[in-house]
Amino acid sequence: MGPVLSSYSLFQRKLQKAFAGLIFGLALTLTISLPARAQEDRAVLTKVKAVYPEMAKRLKITGTVMMNATVTPAGTVKEVKTVMGEKMLLEAAKEAVLKWKFAPADHQTIEDVEVEFP
């Protein structure tokens, strides 16, 4: 029974090492593939107010649209991705945020932004 037990222990150790390597590889892959996030929020220098869509007004649709804005080192918004919000308000919010101006930085950042509609 001794040799079977030691073979099992050896198998168990190899399995643990393989699993640890898999976890490390997965963590490394996620770290490399995630975009760089700002340590602190960059100040918004110019905030353009979103135009409340007429149809949303009539239907009394209100809410907050949450987005991620990719901001260049110069402070201009390069791209906006919607995280969540009412469908009828998304385009108006995106158009407004694309006109915002942020404080300059030494690198591109991704900022979490919100646009509220009454």
Image: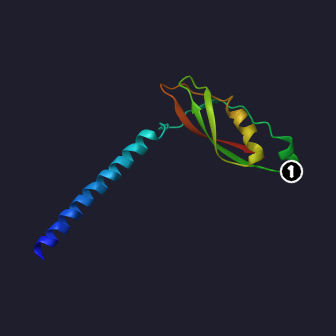
Vertical relation: 64 (above or below) 106: below
Q: Residue furthest bottom?
A: 1
Query: Residue at left 51%, top 26%?
Result: 105
Q: Nearer the viewer, residue 12 or 4?
A: 4
Kindly identify the residue that appears in the image at 43 percent across and 45 percent down.
30
Left or right placement of residue 62 versus residue 103 in this view = right
Q: Residue furthest left?
A: 2
Residue 8 is situated, as x and y percent measured from the top left of the image, at 20, 68
On the rendered structure, is 82 left or right of 32?
A: right
Q: Nearer the viewer, residue 77 or 21?
A: 21
Q: Compared to 109, does 12 lie above or below?
A: below
| Figure label count | 1
- Residue 47: x and y, percent? 68, 32
Drawn side of residue 6 relative to residue 37, left or right: left
Residue carrying label 1? 59
Mark 1 residue type: Leu
**Model colouring:** rainbow
Secondary structure of the residue carrying tag 1 is: loop
Q: Position of residue 63 (x, y in %)?
A: 74, 49
Q: For residue 52, which quarter of the picture?
A: top right
Q: Is residue 62 above or below residue 4?
A: above
In x, y percent, where is residue 66? 65, 45
Quarter holding residue 117: top right
Residue name at image x 79 percent, y 36 percent: 51
**For this rendering, which residue is in front, 87 or 44?**
87
